[in-house]
Image (cartoon, grey):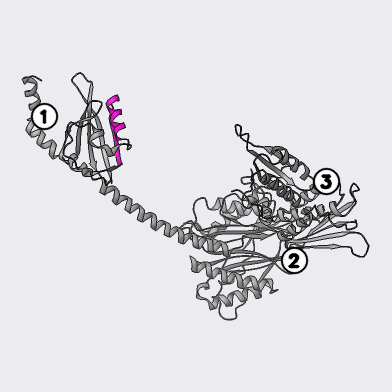
């Protein structure tokens, strides 16, 4: 640079000594690097102090600050030098070694990398400017951690209360021959802390069912615990035969003695599905709603009783009567479903009646809607009426009176393979109409088909099928009673066919009771009688649940899902029932695919609808074959599936 250029630069930038002094005193961390090796040609005091090194000038950056290797700093410098484009970063986390002591420290920088240019515009190096923001970042991270810890503690508290609430509420609803019952429960959106809402559906002696919805004042553990106590008192009174007025009187007296239960509201309906007779009482709770299948709606007359514990000693809440016609649905609900900001309760009740009527007539969101008015009303009233927010727990409980009870099942077929398949279709269709919870259906099906398999194996001589009959009825209290009978003579089982006796023991563990009665006086016939109480799940939350669609029931199939390029490992996916009608094909496919146990085998049972003892026996034999060749049998079955339950009972390990 000639003298005139130097003079002009002095006039524009300042005298070199002044500029150098100011540069060195800048609070920013500043450095300038030259050439592709990024040789340090300038560094101010902040730069030297930050890295604890005085002798930086003339050193390539990789030699001057070797600890930055692998932290993507050198790569950014290379990029800026090569492209001539700036790079900016905020809160870049680095680990540095001030003073080259060998002890790394974690720091954070906001930095800017800019190319330095020659007079012809060519990039000659890179200048970096950075702020040390370590303290600010650490302070913010600490604050975030404190906030996260507080949120975790709050969430833990909410989870405890919500878990307690759900544990105290019925997770299942009874399956009854003359009524379809559904329920939805939604935790208060305001703070997501469960409160004192509760519901119950209790089969009573004589075939009636008690429906209860109540609300204990307050939220949290205390409210949930108090709710559980009151629910137990009222439920005990009802199941021991107390009429509705006496049961409410007991609950009222108990609430009067417990300050936490004072002013609890409750609605009680006792419905006889056979006659439609309906006794009900409302203690501070809005009256139940009755909706017809045609969309007509009416509220029952309010009985006018005050909340529990507020009516004075010896008070007996009044009971009113009505009649639920076939096809009508009675809906009980908590006030969280009808309370809206800036709207009266009457407005809220009018809105509820309109939504419930549309749901019953299937006029609202019909695509994929549940099949019965009770499910539709509970689902849609909760879903639609809480869309704009809600401040309290929301509960809906409905009972739909059927036009008539489900007729008993009576079916008879020969014990041939085709006969058993026809019998299966008949029983499946009958159970479809009942629509019990998956685990209940799995238990009943397993017990029925083990009893049928027992007749196939032991009742008649080989090659000479005889009749097997299945009779089933759903009793008024929700207990399914099923009898499987043959007309053969009992034959002692083949010692090699151990799965048959094991099957009946397995069925006995999964059902509430199972009894085998065989003729011992020379007459013919064996009868297997099972009893199992059926339920449907109560739904927590407004999301779509399993009551919206039946579980698919695919036919039996075995598909090879082995991965290409892995010839030494076989994976099979099994669908449908694995029982006496399909077990031969099942065993043949497993043995063929694994080459008699030579190849490792994984069997996915996720889509198996029934795993009978015949299938279990095949799995045990396959496990032994594989073990002789040094391989394991890997079984896949998701938690909650019927196959998973059976595998647990027979001690076959499952791969998660």
Circle 2 or circle 1, nearest the eye: 1
Give residue 455's mark: none
Tell me where the magenta segment starts and ends, as one range.
Answer: 71-92
Q: CA distance from mark 3 to mark 2?
A: 33 Å
For disc 3, the neighbor class at 10 Å (few under 14, some 14 to 19, many from 20) is: some
> Reading the chain from its start, which is encountered first: label 1 or label 3?
1
Q: Residue at x 53, y 64 (%)?
A: 164
Q: Is residue 383 above or below residue 478?
A: above
Q: Which residue lies under the disc numbered 1?
A: 13
Question: 307 or 55: which is nearer to us?
Answer: 55
Q: Left of 548 or right of it: where is 272?
A: right
Q: Which residue lies under the disc numbered 2?
A: 207
Q: CA distance from mark 2 to mark 1?
A: 100 Å
Callout 1: SS = helix
Q: Does residue 78 belong to the magenta stretch?
A: yes
Q: Is residue 357 visible?
A: no
Residue 44 location, x and y as percent?
Answer: 16, 37
Q: Residue at x 83, y 48 (%)?
A: 420
> Reading the chain from its start, which is encountered first: label 2 or label 1?
1
Q: Left of 131 or right of it: where is 267?
A: right
For disc 1, the neighbor class at 10 Å (few under 14, some 14 to 19, many from 20) is: few
Question: 362 or 652: which is nearer to us?
Answer: 652
Marks 1 and 3 in Cβ contact (< 8 Å): no
> Reading the chain from its start, which is encountered first: label 3 or label 2?
2
Q: Quadrant of the N terminus?
A: top left
Q: Which residue lies under the disc numbered 3?
A: 422
């Amino acid at each position: 640079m000639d003298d005139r250029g130097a003079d002009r630069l002095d006039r524009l930038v300042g005298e070199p000594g002044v500029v150098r002094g100011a540069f060195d005193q800048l609070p920013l961390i500043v450095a300038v690097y030259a050439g592709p090796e990024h040789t340090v040609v300038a560094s101010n005091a902040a730069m030297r102090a930050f890295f604890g090194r005085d002798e930086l000038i003339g050193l390539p950056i990789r030699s001057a600050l070797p600890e930055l290797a692998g932290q993507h700093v050198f790569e950014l410098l290379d990029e800026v030098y090569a492209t001539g484009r700036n790079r900016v970063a905020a809160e870049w986390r680095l680990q540095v070694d001030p003073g080259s002591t060998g002890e790394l420290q974690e720091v954070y920088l906001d930095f800017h990398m800019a190319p330095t240019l020659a007079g012809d515009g060519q990039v000659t190096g890179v200048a970096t400017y950075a702020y040390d923001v370590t303290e600010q970042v650490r302070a913010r991270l600490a604050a975030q951690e404190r906030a996260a810890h507080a949120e975790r503690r709050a969430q833990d508290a909410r989870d405890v209360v919500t878990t307690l609430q759900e544990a105290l509420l019925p997770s299942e609803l009874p399956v009854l021959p003359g009524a379809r019952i559904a329920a939805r429960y939604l935790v208060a959106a305001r703070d997501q802390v469960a409160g004192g809402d509760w519901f119950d559906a209790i089969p009573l002696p004589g075939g009636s069912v008690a429906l209860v919805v109540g609300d204990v004042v307050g939220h949290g553990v205390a409210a949930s615990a108090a709710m559980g106590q009151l629910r137990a008192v009222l439920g005990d009174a009802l199941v021991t035969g107390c009429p509705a007025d006496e049961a409410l009187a007991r609950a009222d007296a108990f609430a009067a003695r417990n300050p936490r239960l004072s002013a609890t509201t409750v609605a009680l309906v006792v419905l006889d599905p056979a006659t439609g007779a309906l006794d009900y009482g409302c203690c501070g709770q809005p009256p139940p709603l009755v909706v017809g299948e045609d969309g007509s709606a009416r509220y029952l007359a309010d009985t006018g009783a005050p909340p529990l514990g507020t009516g004075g000693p010896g008070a007996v809440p009044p009971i009113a009567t009505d009649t639920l016609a076939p096809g009508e649905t009675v809906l009980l609900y908590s006030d969280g479903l009808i309370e809206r900001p800036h709207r009266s309760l009457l407005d809220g009740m009018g809105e509820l009646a309109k939504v419930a009527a549309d749901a019953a007539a299937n006029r609202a969101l019909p695509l994929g809607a549940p099949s019965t008015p009770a499910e539709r009303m509970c689902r849609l009233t909760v879903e639609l009426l809480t869309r704009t927010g809600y401040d309290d727990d929301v509960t809906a409980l409905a009972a739909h009176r059927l036009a008539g009870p489900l007729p008993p099942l009576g079916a008879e077929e020969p014990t041939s393979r085709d006969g058993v398949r026809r019998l299966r279709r008949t029983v499946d269709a009958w159970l479809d109409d009942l629509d019990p919870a998956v685990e209940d259906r799995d238990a009943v099906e397993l017990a029925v088909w083990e009893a049928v398999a027992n007749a196939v194996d032991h009742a008649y001589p080989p090659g000479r099928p005889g009749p097997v009959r299945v009779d089933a009825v759903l009793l008024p209290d929700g207990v399914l009673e099923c009898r499987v009978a043959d007309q053969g003579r009992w034959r002692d089982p083949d010692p090699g066919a151990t799965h048959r006796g094991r099957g009946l023991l397995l069925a006995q563990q999964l059902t509430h009771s199972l009894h085998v009665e065989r003729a011992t006086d020379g007459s013919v016939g064996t009868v297997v009688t099972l009893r199992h109480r059926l339920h449907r799940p109560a739904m927590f939350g407004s999301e779509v649940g399993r009551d919206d669609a039946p579980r698919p029931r695919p036919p039996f199939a075995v598909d090879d899902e082995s991965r290409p390029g892995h010839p030494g490992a076989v994976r099979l996916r099994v669908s449908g029932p694995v029982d006496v009608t399909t077990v031969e094909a099942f065993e043949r496919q497993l043995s063929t695919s694994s080459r008699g146990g030579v190849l490792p085998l994984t069997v996915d049972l996720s889509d198996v609808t029934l795993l009978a003892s015949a299938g279990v026996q095949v799995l045990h034999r396959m496990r032994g074959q594989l073990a002789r060749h040094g391989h394991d049998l890997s079984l896949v079955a998701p938690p909650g599936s019927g196959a998973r339950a059976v595998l647990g009972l027979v001690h076959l390990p499952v791969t998660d």
